[in-house]
Amino acid sequence: MRRVPLRLLHLLAAVWLLTSVGAIIVHAAEPAQSGPPVVIPVAADGVQRATVTIDSYSYTPNHLIVEAEKPVELTLTSVTTIIPHNFIIKDPAGSLSVEQDVSAGKTVTITFTPTQPGTFPIYCDKRLWPLPSHRDKGMEGTLEVR
Ligand SMILES: [Cu+2]
């Protein structure tokens, strides 16, 4: 056995490791792509209805604008084939707490009434350890309550 190929392998392994780790760090640091804000219209019955498409790893639309004190009805439609997701909205101050699992390919309808104006994060907290969470992969959005 000559020694040069072994050293070359070590070098390749080191380069591979550095680029892989670097790619993960860069990916995790990327901000989520924010889509255009969507104002959810108030229907004749006073309900604000919209459909959100859930994919890996996104919500479409992902920036929803609603009015406070009026019910919001969201139809969450998953278009994934294997990966389950969830849909979480939490106001740290406690005015809003929504947490809904959506299995692959399923549609679930949720209803909640925001009471406080503000901007609240929407996100999926699923994660396959040790990979980054779905939220870290960009699965997040914004609920703007006016
Ligand atoms: Cu997810």
Image (cartoon, rainbow, N blue to C red):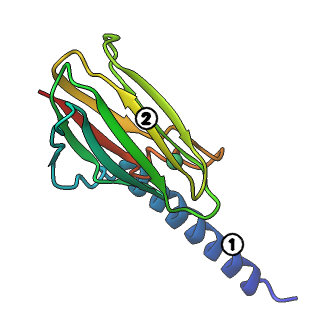
Q: Is residue 143 above or below residue 71?
A: below
Q: Is residue 118 above or below residue 25?
A: above
Q: Is residue 80 above or below residue 73?
A: below
Q: In the rendering, at what x and y percent does residue 112 appear? A: 35, 25
Residue at the far front: name it.
44
Is residue 105 or residue 126 the one in the foreground? 105
Going from the N terminus, do you reach mark 1 or mark 2 first? Answer: 1
Residue that carries the numbered disc 2 in the rendered image:
110
Q: In the structure shown, which secondary structural element does the residue marked by tag 2 occupy?
A: strand
Residue positioned 23% across, 15% down in the render: 115
Q: Is residue 1 above or below residue 45?
A: below
How far apart in space, not on screen, are marks 1 and 2 (Cα)? 54 Å
Q: In the rendering, at what x and y percent does residue 92 appear? A: 34, 15
Q: Is residue 81 left or right of residue 134?
A: right
Identity, as a three-letter code, of the amino acid under mark 1:
His
Residue that carries the numbered disc 1 in the rendered image:
10
Q: Is residue 60 left or right of residue 21?
A: left
